[in-house]
Amino acid sequence: MWSASTMAAQPVEYWGCKFNEGKDMGDLMGWTEKWNEVADDLSDQSYSAWVMTPMFTESMSQYDFIWGGAWGSYQQMGTGMGEFFGGDEGSALFAEFQEITTCNSHTLWTSVTIRQGE
């Protein structure tokens, strides 16, 4: 029998973002191809990421998209963030991200799986 008490807490981040003038989802998806190449070379491979666009919300104009990302553990989060943002390639790539979009919200949440899908 599955039990939520056996699942460890996982860190999940959310970035709420608006495209900069003249930029759109095509620019972001092009950037994610480069991001995936850099991420593939990091020592920690636990990070999963999603780009989410609003279907309905009380404020449809607040964000153009949300970047959601999750690590397997807080230790892996520290390793991954340090390696990505502390390295020349990752920090340069993040600067490119900031040319595409402005993210006014960056939050970190603790997530505990309460039901695992099949």
Image: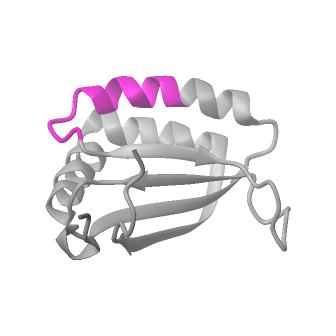
Is 65 in the magenta? no
Residue 115 image point, x, y percent = 39, 63
Image quadrant assignment for residue 111: bottom left
**What span is colored magenta in the figure?**
32-45
Q: Quadrant of residue 88?
A: top left
What is the basis of the colouring in this image? Answer: one colour
Q: Nearer the viewer, residue 32 or 82?
A: 32
* Residue 104 placement, left or right of 56: left
Q: Residue at x 52, y 45 (%)?
A: 50
Residue shown at 49%/23% (left/top)? 33
The residue at the point 28 percent across, 44 percent down is 84
Q: Is residue 37 above or below residue 92?
A: above
Residue 56 image offset from top left, x and y in percent: 83, 61
Rendered location of residue 12, percent (x, y): 39, 63
In this rendering, position of residue 61 left or right of residue 8: right
Majority SS type along the magenta span: helix
Which residue is at 67% across, 29% downward?
Answer: 27
Quadrant in which the N terminus is drawn = bottom left
Instruction: Judge whether 32 appears above or below 55 on screen.
Output: above
